[in-house]
């Protein structure tokens, strides 16, 4: 990659955004981050000074000028989560889609060369007809989060066909990593590790037999960088680990790694949860020359080390 390119990261202060921004800086990019919080929360890191942190909602007058002179736009931002999006689907739609369309319009005007969008491999497909799930699988989301992600994909298609705006969609499975907010009940790997390290009961929706595809954040960053320079004919890629793990198996692994026992409480199953979600990542392997490199065991060990060090801070 060239050392003179300018990248804009929507959602750069989030845990995926921070990992991507840091990597882009190390590759020599000029980087602008657009997010509500501006700079990330927590202790400042040396590489932060190389980022232009813009505090703004996506698509507002403050955020739109960030695209001037940009070559690539990474869209990682979302104001909602799968588990909460159905509570207020109107907010989910207004806060995620309208601003995005404004940014796409500006991207055309600013002659941005490539948009890379992080969609959701866990929600856009809905109830799988088969596992692993290929990119050609029908898309019938059963939560508002999946619907807004799919709508963004469709707008990207429209802008590509009508305006020539190049775009790549990455349908990412259940992502986890060290900078994820451990206190939120979001992301089973991170949340369960936080509970285990803190000797708190782990709460599971349903009987724990549901199976998910967990992918480490640095593998997702690698896929984003591959997508930014991809020049082939495909536009949508599944990004996952290549294996599914049940919640019960995940908990067993975590408790083995932390070497302690905590209670596991089972709550009523949720209507939008599906039995298994495993992505077929063969297209990404073939076209992007991308495959995951961090095993679940290694990722869990890294996250436990991070959570343990945080719990020791006075």
Image (cartoon, helix red, strand yellow):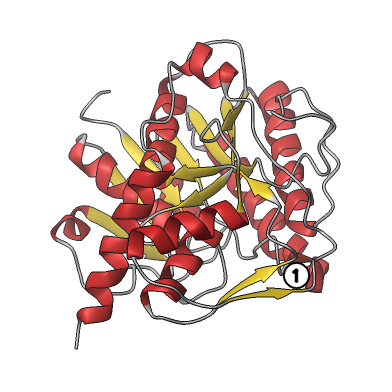
Q: Residue at x 49, y 17 (%)?
A: 285
* Vertical placement of residue 68 versus 93, above or below: above
- Give x and y (percent) for residue 94: 74, 64
Query: Regarding mark 1 in the picture, which secondary structure is present there?
Result: helix
* Place of residue 244 in the rendered image (x, y in percent of width and height, measured from the top left): 60, 39
Task: State whether residue 70 is above or below residue 36.
Answer: above
* Residue sticking out furthest to the bottom: 314
Residue situated in front as seen by the camera: 312 or 135: 312
The answer to whether residue 291 is left or right of residue 24 is right
Q: Is residue 7 visible?
A: yes
- Quadrant for the N terminus in the image: top left
Question: Image quadrant for the C terminus?
Answer: bottom left
**Residue 271 versus residue 9: which sits nearer the camera?**
271
Q: Quadrant of residue 152?
A: top right
183 on left or right of 78? left
| Residue at 34 percent of width and 68 percent of height | 40
Q: Splitting the image into 4 quarters, where does residue 162 fall?
A: top right
Question: Which residue does the numbered mark 1 point to in the structure image?
Answer: 91
State the residue in front, 248 or 61.
Answer: 248
Where is residue 292 drawn, in percent x and y? 42, 30
Q: Quadrant of residue 52?
A: bottom left
Q: Is residue 14 visible?
A: no
**Depicted 205 relative to depicted 97: above or below:** below
Q: Position of residue 308 (x, y in %)?
A: 27, 71
Q: Is residue 197 above or below residue 152?
A: below
């Amino acid at each position: 990659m060239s050392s003179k390119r300018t990248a804009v990261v929507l959602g750069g202060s989030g845990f995926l955004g921070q990992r991507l921004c840091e990597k882009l800086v190390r590759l020599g990019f000029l980087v602008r981050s657009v997010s509500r919080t501006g700079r990330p929360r927590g202790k400042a890191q040396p590489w932060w000074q190389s980022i232009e942190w813009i505090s703004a909602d996506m698509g507002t007058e403050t955020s739109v000028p960030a695209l001037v002179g940009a070559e690539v736009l990474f869209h990682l931002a979302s104001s909602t989560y799968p588990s909460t999006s159905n509570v207020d689907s109107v907010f989910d739609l207004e806060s995620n889609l309208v601003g995005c369309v404004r940014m796409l319009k500006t991207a055309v005007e600013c002659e941005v060369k490539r948009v890379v969008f992080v969609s959701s491999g866990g929600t856009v497909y809905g109830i799988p007809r088969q596992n692993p799930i290929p990119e050609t699988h029908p898309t019938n989301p059963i939560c508002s989060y999946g619907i807004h992600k799919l709508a963004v994909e469709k707008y990207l298609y429209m802008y590509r066909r009508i305006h020539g705006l190049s775009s790549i969609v990455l349908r990412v499975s259940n992502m986890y990593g060290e900078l994820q907010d451990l206190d939120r009940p979001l992301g089973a790997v991170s949340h369960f590790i936080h509970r285990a390290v803190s000797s708190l009961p782990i709460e599971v929706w349903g009987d724990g037999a549901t199976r998910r595809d967990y992918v480490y954040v640095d593998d997702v960053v690698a896929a984003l960088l591959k997508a930014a320079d991809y020049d082939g004919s495909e536009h949508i890629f599944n990004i996952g680990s290549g294996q599914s793990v049940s919640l019960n198996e995940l908990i067993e692994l975590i408790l083995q790694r932390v070497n302690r026992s905590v209670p596991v409480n089972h709550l009523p199953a949720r209507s939008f949860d599906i039995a298994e979600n495993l992505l077929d990542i063969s297209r990404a392997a073939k076209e992007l020359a991308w495959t995951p490199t961090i095993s679940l065991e290694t990722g869990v060990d890294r996250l436990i080390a991070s959570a343990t060090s945080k719990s020791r801070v006075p």
